Image (spheres, grey):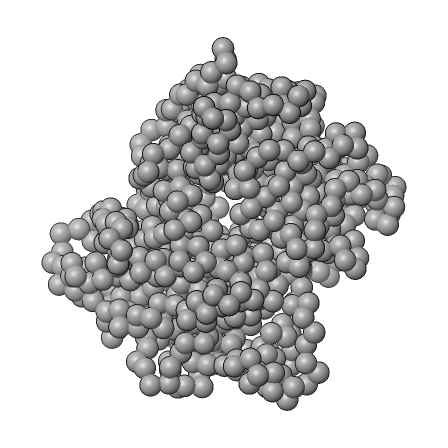
Amino acid sequence: MKRLPFFTLLASLGLAACSQPNEPVSSEPEPDSASDMMSSNSMDNEPAPRFYEEVEGEQAMAKVSAWNERTLDKLTADPRFAEFQSEALEIVNATDRIAYGSYSAGYVYNFWQDEKNVRGMLRRTSLNSYKSAEPEWDVLLDIDALNAKESANWVYKGSSCLEPDFTRCMVRLSDGGKDAVEIREWDHEQKAFIGDGFYIPEAKSSTSWLDIDTLIVGTDWGEGSLTESGYARIAKTLKRGQSLEQADVLFEGEMTDVAAGVSRVKTGKDSYVLLGLRSLTFYDRAYYWLNEGEQIQMPLPAKSSPQGVFNGQLVISLQEDWVVSDEQTFASGSLMSFDLEQWKKDRSISNAQVVYQPDERSTVSSMTRSQSRILVSVLENVIGKIYAFDYKDNAWVKTELSIPGTGTVSISSASDETDIIFVNQQTFLQANTQYAVNAVENTSEPIKQSPARFNAEGLVVEQREATSADGTQVPYFIVREEGIELDGTMPTLLYAYGGFQISMTPRYSGIRGKLWLENGGAYVLANIRGGGEFGPSWHQAGLKTNRQVIFDDMAAVAEDLIDNKITSPKKLGIMGGSNGGLLMGVMYNQRPDLFNAVVCQVPLLDMLRYHKLLAGASWVGEYGSPDIAEERAFLESISPVHNVAADKDYPAIFFVTSTKDDRVHPGHARKMAHVVEQYGHEFEYYENIDGGHSAAADLQETAKRVSLEYTFLAQKLMDE
């Protein structure tokens, strides 16, 4: 039910980063038989047969079933698994956890899952009731009941609702957790889907409201309507009562774009503009002002993102320097603005100015707005702050919001119809606290507190730095028992991501604390390059053929832990998912001497075919293209599937993926498991049938998956 500000247009298009676990198969013609596949493999020097790319193919699923059975027999036989699963289930199903909500039109909306509501329910209550210890919830949509009624496997993927009442919504339902969704019109007052309402069949679609009788829709309109990455390239206006075939084209991108679509951007209480977006690559974009048949490209840098309009100023986030004039240059990483109305009149950029300029150790995490302020979340040396900005007398005025304590802060709800926002705060050892913050009066009221899920007594958090191969200082956090002798015997789990400008910040995890920290393990979070912790330059340093610096950063953190006798290779394990799964695969090949266990979740591992599988083509801007000789040579040198050796000593590796993952193809994990098995190296494998890119469709599946992972880690790092 959460409404997305303009900066999340990419996500609203269905376009997603290869993000950590928290598209149709390749359009390339497939061989007709297994023997054809094998001959094709030898031609392309592929180390594993392509039948693993058939998501539910008989041969692929036979191997998956055998691997699953072997791993489940081994790990569930360990007494710790049952204990871990029981503890994890107690945590994920706890009824006293914070019911995070979004506040709109007098109601707080929440989506809730627990032991009884496995797939969850959408519900709402008043703000005053929400602040109480026992809110009185009104259940709107029960997904478990819907599944029973329709004999379906729906997973709720959110909804977008029409302002100002927010009662008429487009609800997104996924079969088993896939990115592809079916979208139906729903009415909160009737608590029912509209019988003859808007309906978009399953696809990677986006919808936004123009008015009660008109939608902007991006979807699979038929042959030729998708980009090479498998996303919509045509946006149309769909009137109530029209079929999809009758919708009128509003905006089009090119086949070679990653995606294209249109967003409705409010400029005032009752006014808006339509902005078209062509995502040329994952990071390069072209924006168009759409006005009564006109389509005018806006003079914005390719690496920039409009964030919204406030008091006539169009606010832009920059991921590259922008020379606006001979007198004005705005730096990469900054927020800036200019007069939108003046640009609409004569196409000139006037009154351009900085909203927020981070330094080399800070970055903008996100921007949204309340009724009277824009709100900017920032990281300053990986510590979170939120600033409120007002625009008056032709200048931006900044105020830091007063939120008690320090740690990771994030805005969980904000609306342009109220100045009350919800802010969440947490640390590695401090459970989540939710505050109701008045963005104008700068007051905060704690309204929800999650109970502690593990015993943090005696634990300490440190922030350290490791020196990478090129001399770059790479920060990392370590959570460990205080006052013990550092002799290299501490079981340590190192987590990292390193891509897509996604920042890794301190977060409270009851499961990690209960299953790992309470049992004597240490936890390390590495802020390696490729992420967004220090702005665009931190991310861009590791793009394409420069990606080795990311892997060097990871190795440097591991070496620093070992050199300081916090742990040793025998006691050090690593974990990462999606892009972080690629990181795990590379570290497995490049530095097996540093680790004794690797947990590789929903990973990219075949870097010579990743661009032909599902959403892979959209990530060429991050990884480079196997179709370009120089980039292919580098990708082949780091591609995990292509670099496993028969005569090398490797740590044990645990592959975790999902059959329903339609973002990162499960074939990546399957191929790597095939190669590792072929060479006789130790591995475990678990492929959940449901779950999508999170590898779990509900809390029970999450509890099972993490219990398997921590049982594996305990066996390798605590027993050996």
Q: Which of the 4 image quadrants contains residue 416? A: top right
In this rendering, is residue 18 above or below 186?
A: below
Tell me the residue at 65%/78% (across/down).
Answer: 57
Tell me the residue at 32%/77% (across/down).
Answer: 650
Tell me the residue at 32%/75% (across/down).
Answer: 651
- Give percent across and percent down for residue 120: 60, 50
Q: Name the quarter where the C terminus is drawn.
A: bottom left
In front here: 225 or 487?
Answer: 225
Residue 234 visible within the image: yes
In front here: 583 or 212?
Answer: 583
- Give percent across and percent down for residue 291: 75, 29
- Give percent across and percent down for residue 225: 75, 54
Q: Which of the 4 image quadrants contains residue 661? A: bottom right
How many marks are shown on the rendered structure?
0
- Residue sticking out furthest to the bottom: 35
In front here: 323 or 625?
Answer: 323
In front here: 150 or 331?
Answer: 331
In this rendering, is residue 71 above or below 288?
A: below
Q: Name the quarter where the N terminus is drawn.
A: top right
In this rendering, is residue 702 above or below 242?
A: below
- Give percent across and percent down for residue 60: 59, 79
